[in-house]
Amino acid sequence: MIRALHRWAGLLALVLIGVLALSGAALSVFPAAERLAVPQAAAGLTVATLAERIRNVHPGVEQIRRAPSGRITAYWFDQGVPGAAVIDPATGEGVASADPNRTLRWLTSLHRSLFLGDGGRIAMAAGALAMLVLSLSGIALVARHVGGWRRWFIRLNGPLAGRLHTEIARIAVAGLILSSTTALWMTASTFDLLPNGSTTPALPAEVSGETGSTLDGMPTLRQTPVSELREVSFPYSGDATDVFTLRTDRGTGYLDQGTGALLGWADLTGWERMSETIYMLHTGQGAAVLGLLLGVLALGVPAMGATGVAIWLAGGRGRPRIRCNQPASRADTVLLVGSEGGSTWGFAATLHAALTKAGLRVHVGPMSAFAPHRYAAARRIVVLAATYGDGAAPTSAKGFLDRLIAAEVMPHAPLAVLGFGDRSFPAYCAFAEAVASSAQAKHWPELQPFHTIDRQSLQEFARRVRSLGRTLGCDLELSHRPVLPMTRTLTLLSRRDYGAEVDAPTAILRFALPPVPLWQRLTGGGFGRFIAGDLIGILPEGSPVPRLYSLASGRRDGFIEIVVRKHPGGLASSRLTALEPGDTVTAFLRRNPGFRTGSGHGPLILIGAGTGIGPLAGFVRGNAGRRPIHLFFGMRRPSSDFLYGEEIPAWQLQGRLTRLVTAVSRGTRPRYVQDALRDDAGEVARLIGNGARVMVCGGREMAAGVADVLTEILASAGLTLEALKVEGRYVEDVY
């Protein structure tokens, strides 16, 4: 409910709020600029002295006003001709025109009413209300996303658009709430929806009838500092019954023009002071620094609007349209989906169609929307969860585990968890398994035992669905249409071939960067931003399951590079290794946050064999800061498959690679990368003891051997591999 309220309020009011925020940000500059531009009254200067100085220069002065910025403006008649000027309080002389700034006036009209009068004021009030709704719902969403109020400023992970949206919101939301609530107050006041609350003293019934008192002879003017002045109006010339009117920050009073006596006074009421404070908070008039701060925060609105739209588009991308999707509160069967690339949504849509055809009322929604109270009518809940990176929650499941663990009451409907993943990855279905374990720990009733689907196997999915049907007492008929990721066409620029002599044909393929829409460049979506270690997916013809390859380049390198070994019968590898320059292939990008070099300048120990050198070479290539990198690389024969052998000497000369240790497995003395690590145990232990980060890429057997050797090395130094993993200093990308 909160997410829907936040999303639709934002989409409907995006343009209006954008105009409101941008015009408000522009207006916030004027109070500060005016305060810097106009002469300021000296400390201790009184209204009497100021008025006398102005009257000496302009004998026909009728009124003096002081703005919150300190600008003093005088109005007079000279031989029947009106005049006005901004005054230098030190001399009483005019220094600038009193005419309103045309730009300021235009922006003010735009900001208040869109140049449309009362109708425009109502529209802008609606925009302020939408901003308030967005701010309050955004606070709830951020708190839920980060795991509570105490973690408000916790470091964020995930796609760039989502991180920017939340980071800006965490900083700007207080200012946006202040601006929107004060705007609504001022609109209500404009339409007389609030009590007036002002008190003006009654005009004096009797005056002295005298004229000619000197301004310095009036005690009230002599005792009032200019810093408190708002306005002083002079009596009409020749009218002995008229009086001086003085308005200050404290109140309003009348002065006898003959005796200077105070004839009446009314202090500002509490309501007036509140209204003026709200006006000051909204406009920055009288608080220029606050106004500038609110203006800067207002600039967060269009930024959050752009990132919000990017998040919304990314959230819907890859999702199939689900017809007859029942509301969560009325559904007897709830399907909660955790998906990163969209394929799991396709399986959810298939299951939804089968359950609906069987006569059930089914709701499909993201796991991120999980709230136990929403499923009052549910008789069963099924979770379909993919795993992102090294066991992390996919995009549509953010926050699910935190809310599950924090929930005091579990839904009465029993739960079934179905995990989707690829067994070639170490963290196979790790997130789905964590969901099942947490649900069991919370004593959530079980509908079916935890099951997994490997590589989007339709046959395995069908078996699980039939099992679910038997549990429900009905036959479920499946008609599955896989959801394919959005792809881009990549054109091959060049290729280098290796491994023919050892029956392991391998190629380094370099593709041109595909055209990327501007919004993807700004948000980092698609191929708009990537680094070495991320993945590109290739969809082989005749298979719905993508093959993923680690990138050996980042976007800054200006190309896309992967290392591919041809496998017998491999659909994707056969297609890729057959490409010639100019040929094309369709691909999509997937982030790999679990395989990053991390920040800092500590040493890196990179360990890889065969095509596993791909992302490691990308890390070395991108090491412009000359971070110490020690590369352990296993190959069969240097003459056949020394991948990147041409570039490595140059990288060493440039300081991008500190040391290279090779292991050759074919020859008179076979040596594997594990052996190279064992032979260099002392240096490896020293580097790890000094904070080195270890990164392993390659086949599963090689990675297991490396882990065993490192366990031995670390034991001698009083360390453990598990401790390194917990610290994030040991990461793998294995296949």
Image (cartoon, rainbow, N blue to C red):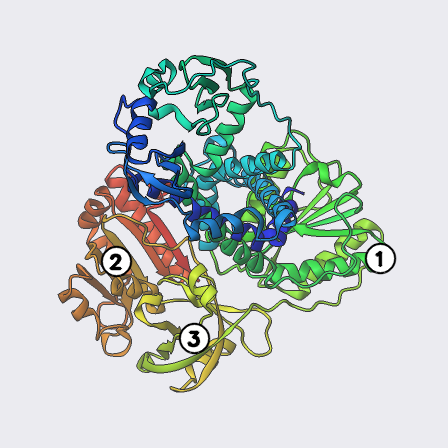
Query: What amino acid is labelled 2 in the image?
Result: Asp
Q: What residue is rendered at 53% in x and 49% in y?
A: 109
In the image, residue 597 sits, relative to residue 44, either above or below, namely: below
Q: CA distance from mark 3 to mark 2?
A: 41 Å
Left or right: 668 as drawn, with respect to 411: left
Q: What residue is rendered at 18% in x and 47% in y?
A: 682
Find residue 358 and name its label.
1
Pair 1/3: label in front: 3
Residue 651 visible from this viewpoint: yes
Residue 402 visible from this viewpoint: no
Q: CA distance from mark 1 to mark 3?
A: 45 Å
In the image, residue 581 sits, relative to residue 514, either above or below, namely: below
- Report x, y in % for residue 493: 36, 82
As helix, strand or loop, the secondary structure at mark 2 comes to: helix
In the image, residue 121 sits, relative to residue 488, either above or below, namely: above
Q: CA distance from mark 1 to mark 2?
A: 60 Å
Which residue corresponds to mark 3?
Answer: 514
Q: Quadrant of the C terminus?
A: bottom left
**Residue 91 sits in which quadrant?**
top left
Answer with mark 3 or mark 2, whichever residue precedes in sequence: 3
Query: What amino acid is labelled 1 in the image?
Result: Ala
Which residue corresponds to mark 2?
Answer: 675
**Residue 439 sits in which quadrant?**
top right
**Residue 270 sits in which quadrant?**
top right
